Image (cartoon, helix red, strand yellow):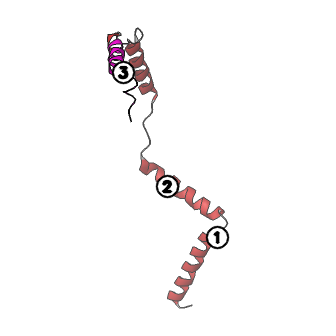
Amino acid sequence: MSDSAARPNADEEWENLLRQWRAQPAPQPRPYFYSRVCARLVSEADGVRPAVRAWLRWPAYAAMLGIVMMLSGDDITLHAADSANRYEAHLIGK
């Protein structure tokens, strides 16, 4: 249940408060704020180097993955090589 019965002039209080807020002047940024922002954006844009294309990084990712798999200790690469060798030997007939 609302508390309006206990405070019959609550709506008037809200209206007065809102009028006070509306009467306040709008806040202004400090002097030269936008000039400083633009200068910072320009200076940061000059220092940014072009990003390396993603496809240039793929060989490095593949090499790192291979190294991690070889060093991981679960011998996943050795099992793959061993099964490939057995399959090749089976095809040749040895």
**Residue 10 belongs to the span the image colors magenta:** yes
Q: Residues within 10 Å of mark 3 (few under 14, many from 20)?
A: few
Residue type indicated by callout 2: Pro
**Closer to the camera in the image, 67 or 20:** 20
* Rendered image: mark on residue 59: 2
- Eye-nearest disc, 3 or 2: 3
Residue to which mark 1 is pinned: 75
Residue 30: % across, % down: 42, 10
Q: State which region is magenta.
A: 1-21
N-terminal of the pair, mark 1 or mark 3, is 3
Residue type indicated by callout 3: Ala
Q: Secondary structure at mark 1?
A: loop
Q: Quadrant of the C terminus?
A: bottom right
Callouts 3 and 2 close, C-beta under 8 Å? no
Hey, which quadrant is residue 4 in on the image? top left
- Measure the C-alpha gap from mark 1 to mark 3: 76 Å
Hey, which quadrant is residue 21 in on the image? top left
